[in-house]
Image (cartoon, grey):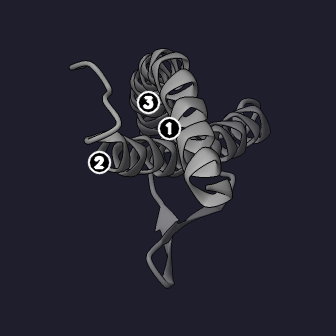
Amino acid sequence: MSDITPENVQEKLNLFQQMQQQVQALSQQASQIDMSIRETERTIEEIKNAEKDTVLYRAIGSIMKKVDDINKLREDLGEEKETMEIRNKSLKNQIEKLNGELGEMQKKLTPVLQNVQEASGKNASE
């Protein structure tokens, strides 16, 4: 990131806010994926001991479809969980990276903002 000057401080503040919003959005996505992973784990645990003749249904959109092959369902759920875990790890890495960048930016912004506020305070009292 380039140096922050009194002239470009507003632009950098806007960028800082955009990055904060991005972190918030990514955090919400990660939270939703965490919930989906837990739900999938509960489902896998629930069908773990299901017999071949057990009748199961799977939600597909707004309909329920009868499951013909429980082993295939177990396999599919395991793959879905793995995919969600990979996506979640990627999101958390992005969040961590952005939080690091935000911390650096904040360190650079704080002194410049204090100088701008002091300068505007002096001008107002004159």
Residue 112 at least partly seen: yes
> Residue 118's x, y, as percent?
62, 38
Quarter containing the C terminus: bottom right
Q: Which mark is residue 11?
A: 2
Instruction: Tell me which residue sits at (42%, 17%) in the image.
Output: 97
Q: Which mark is residue 12?
A: none
Helix, strand or loop under label 1:
helix
Query: Image check: 34 left or right of 13?
Result: right
Of residue 53 and residue 13, the one placed in the foreground of this image is 13
Q: Which residue is mark 1?
A: 77
Q: Is the residue 80 above or below the residue 2 in the image?
A: below
Instruction: Tell me which residue sits at (54%, 16%) in the image.
Output: 107
Quarter containing the N terminus: top left
Q: Earlier in the sequence, mark 1 or mark 3?
A: 1
Disc 1 versus disc 3: distance between alpha carbons?
A: 21 Å
Badge nearest the viewer, 2 or 3: 2
Which residue is farthest bottom?
Answer: 62
Other-residue count near label 1 (Cα within 10 Å), few / some / many at <14 / 14–19 / ≥20: some
Q: Which residue is mark 3?
A: 91
Question: Which amino acid does the dot numbered 3 rest on?
Answer: Leu
> Residue 49's x, y, as percent?
76, 31
Mark 2 vs 3: CB contact within 8 A:
no
Other-residue count near label 2 (Cα within 10 Å), few / some / many at <14 / 14–19 / ≥20: few
Query: Image check: 48 left or right of 37?
Result: right
Of residue 92 and residue 3, the one placed in the foreground of this image is 3
Instruction: Tell me which residue sits at (64%, 43%) in the image.
Output: 31
Question: Which amino acid does the dot numbered 2 rest on?
Answer: Glu
Q: Earlier in the sequence, mark 2 or mark 3?
A: 2
Q: Earlier in the sequence, mark 2 or mark 1?
A: 2
